[in-house]
Image: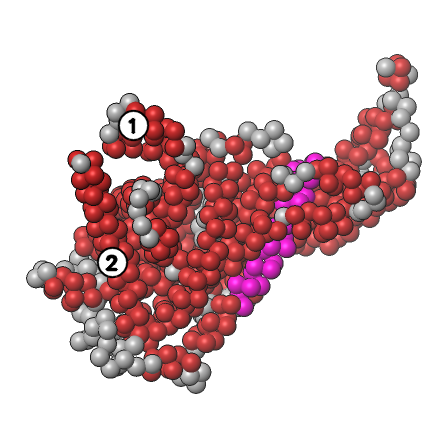
Amino acid sequence: MEATGRQTKHRKTALALSLIPGLGQFYNKQIMKGFMFFILTISFAVAFADLINIGLWGIVTLGEQLPRDHSIFLLTQGIIAVLVIAIGLLIYFLNLRDAYVNGKNRDLGIPLNSVREQYRNVSEQGFPYLMLAPGFFLLIFVVIFPILFVILLSFTNYDLYHSPPANLVDWIGIQNYIDIFSMDIWRNTFLDVFSWTIVWTFFATTGQIAIGIFLAVLMNQKDLKFKGIIRTIFILPWAVPAFVSILVFAGMFNETFGAINNDILAAFGIDSIPWLTEPFWTKVALILIQFWLGFPFIFAMVTGVLQSIPNELYEAATVDGASIWQKFRAITLPMILFAIAPILITQYTFNFNNFNVIYLFNGGGPAVSGQTAGSTDILISWIYKLTFTSAQYGKAAAITMLLSVIVIAVALWQFRRTKSFQEEDMM
Amino acid sequence: MSTKMQNTIRLTLSYIVIAIACIIILYPVAWIIGSSFNPGDSLSGSSIIPENATLQHYKDLFNTAESDYLLWYWNTLKICIITMILAVAMISCMAYAFSRYRFVGRKNGLMTFLILQMIPNFAALIAIYVLAYITGFLDTHFALILVYAGGLLPMNTWLAKGYFDTIPKELDESARIDGAGHFRIFWQIILPLAKPILAVVALFSFITPFTDFILAQIILRSEEKFTLAVGLYRMISDQFGNEFTTFAAGSVLIAIPISILFLSLQRYFISGLTAGGTKG
């Protein structure tokens, strides 16, 4: 390039001057833009100086004296301060980049944009940001902010005894995580709850998938009559809101007036079963209920897949003398599993976090003496109890982190296998 | 002859299995409907077809002086509809930007959505509770609507973006040549063509808050603000069995309209979930 031969150093000068926002733009003779960067920076600093000052102090100390300081308010302000600083750094970075790019253009002898062109540029390139702004704003406040809050909370001792405004909350590092794995009471409860969560997820989900596939294949026989009405009945448990069904089941399994003990089991001459007071039977009931609630979704999905399997495959297999079972093993099942594999994985993660059925059926009970979790609590319902009945916010946050790591790991593993990551315009 | 025998046996067995499945599915439905007509408050001595069927429990629910049920119904519909409008508006704007524009931060934005979508929105329930508490938004529908709408954004934006990608870009370009602005292309060309996916997104945005229990349970405190899920739960958890027949009537009144809505729009649900499951 000839321009570099002239050894002008506008890019470096502009970059260096832009350490004070605006100066680089002035140097590049873009007075309007420089002015805007300058004003923006000044007003940013003035408007947020207090917030950033208090926020950073608060997030580091979580308050020093009572009753002046409220630790959780300070933590919240701290997160906001960090977010504001991030936005500030972004503007600062844009300022540096702008000065550098325009300086480089001058080095290369390319004419710079006039004010009118700059305005057009902003309105052209700004449009997608304008469209994204409301959604992102909402996401930051109701999704990202709470997540940051939980992450930070898991490193504090926020609980009933360290609860503002009467007490201060302190940073305790990874003590919550250490406690969960080393203190007997926490470790035992965690292991109990975790192992039941795994057992629950495995049996409830696998069962609902197996039933769904079985019924879909059954309904796919050509010479069956009344298919439409039967399919509608099979979808019905999915159509009724789950919270209604679960509460109805809680009534049906009730030991004093429920229909299961009084009508059905009595009709077969079987003694009453303690569905809600004996952990084993509660677990059985929960898994059975989840079968009922969960199979229609799989049924509907698989029905769709089955209709797309070409008939020639079966005809060829029949010619080769394959039995019904062999056709199912070699054609139907692989086709189904291939088509709905991603959905099956989401079914497992859904049940892993299936708060509704656990909580609404029996509140995670029956209770276990000396534990904060009931005998059928899964991780998410235990977190709920720790938060709302025993006010163990710090521990609950730490367990939430452990749970999220598991869920995200599974989800990442799944998404790596799907198209989303491979789309050319994604990368 | 023997293949005919085989066929008969296969069909008979199939019908037996189907009949058993239907009984298991329909029994709870019949039981709750029967209970709702059962005279008296408790179920002792009741049967599926009650002898002195009564509409009293339904009348009780509609008696606004005695019961908050209608209020809960109204709250739920209000929350669901506002959430739906808010979510659909934001999702269609974001999906359009992600689908049609190449801008700095696009890839990171999409990645953020993908990761946020994996985190169940109640994983942050402690934070939502504490934040609602200290900002004074606890026990308001406003907080609940914002949380619902925010939680719907990541997954549904991906869903809608996937559909927008399939609308040919030539349409935008020819409109641009004719002098249409960014917003006009979005409003007059893309949105009408995207109606099917917007219907799916709207459906999800309505049903998700309707069937949610946990977020409503932590945010709403006073009885007149409850949604149906929380109200119905309190109805039987506070005095279990004593009001069971009224609870049954309340359940029936929720289950029937929602089931009809669901069954008639089933196709959209399945198409949406299939697309969401395979495309991420």
Q: Which residue is mark 2?
A: B23
Res. A177 in view: no
Q: Secondary structure at mark 2?
A: helix
Q: A63 left or right of B63?
A: right
Q: Quadrant of residue B67?
A: bottom left
Give the chain letter at badge 2. B
Of residues A3 and B272, which is closer to you in this image? B272
Q: Does label 2 lie on the same chain as label 1?
A: no
Of residues B98 and A12, which is closer to you in this image? B98
- What segment is highlighted magenta in the picture? B78-106
Q: Amino acid at mark 2?
A: Ile
The residue under the point 23% across, 45% down is B11
Q: Is residue A224 magenta?
A: no
Q: Which residue is mark 1?
A: A318
Q: Is residue B176 above or below residue B268?
A: above
Q: Is residue B92 magenta?
A: yes
For the residues labelled 1 and 2, say whether their Cβ atoms are less than 8 Å apart: no
Q: Amino acid at mark 1?
A: Thr
x, y percent for residue B216: 45, 63
The disc placed on residue B89 is: none
Q: Quadrant of residue B42?
A: bottom left
Of residues A331 and A373, which is closer to you in this image? A331
